[in-house]
Image (spheres, helix red, strand yellow):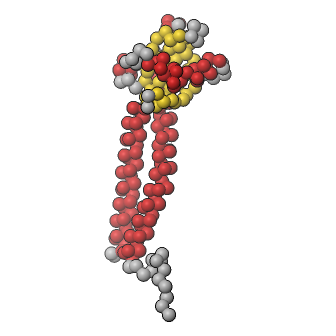
Amino acid sequence: MKSKKNLFSLKHYSLVKQLLIVFGLLAIAFVMILMPVLDSNVKGIIADQMYDSLEESQTALKSFTITRDDTAKGRVSHIFYNSKLNYIPWCTGFRDRSMPLFLYQYVYGDDLVNIVKDNAHKSIEGKGIYEGKTYYYRIAKFSISALNSDYVISIISDDYSAELLSSLTNRVVYIQYVFLGITAFILILWVFS
């Protein structure tokens, strides 16, 4: 009576084929498990970086150290809001003057209403989508008597986060290639020594 060959057994393959199969399965598992974890962590780091950039920009505004270069890059835009009169006396960094109103309506309006109503919060951070773009924003109590405002809304678009995400993802992919290459090299040296 002939014994049945178990297709899932690696015993009937040569050592090189066994190592290639094991290495291939490990590489697939590495990519399938690690990539989603890395992706969520990288996106969290990016969001934190965006909010830190907004906070730094607001701190620069408070100390009047913001430069024209900061607003010229178009990365952070500021909207000054007067809650007593419910109007925007001044904004900076927008090419289209109607953009702050659209962003109010679709992105940060609810949080602005909440922070004005609730005096316990000094700042609120969030993000929203308008016309297919994600906007990160930070609303803070910020009094400038010359501008007749008591809140500032700092906004940055996802263009900057996309640059950061692309840069970090490329670095992570290169690190994975190096790791897999070194592992393959060690396995090849081990097999042929």
Vertical position of residue 191 compared to residue 63: above or below: below
Residue 76, by quadrant, is top left
Which residue is rendered at x = 38% and y = 70% of the image? 20
* Residue 115 rendering spot, x and y as whole percentages: 61, 20
Q: Residue at x 39, y 32 (%)?
A: 159
Horizontal arrangement in the rendering, residue 6 relative to residue 96 (left or right): right
Q: Could you tell me residue 22's position as x and y percent?
A: 43, 69
For residue 106, side relative to residue 189 (left or right): right
In which image quadrant can residue 156 be found?
A: top left
Outermost residue toward the bottom in this view: 1
* Position of 10 relative to 175 (above/below): below
Residue at (46%, 27%) from the top-left corner? 130
**Viewer-side residue, 30 vs 112:** 112
The answer to which of 9 and 93 lies nearer the viewer is: 9
Residue 149 appears in the picture as rendered:
no
The answer to whether 58 is drawn above or below residue 180 in the figure is: above
Q: Total number of numbered labels?
A: 0
At horizontal 39% and vertical 17% (from top left) the residue drawn is: 96
Please state the horizontal and vertical placement of residue 12, each as a whole percent of the image. 42, 81
Using the rendered image of the protein, determine whether residue 36 is visible from the camera's viewpoint: yes
Screen quadrant of the C terminus: bottom left
Whole-percent x and y of residue 39? 47, 46
Viewer-nearest residue: 131 or 188: 131
Question: Is 68 drawn above or below residue 54 in the view shown?
Answer: above
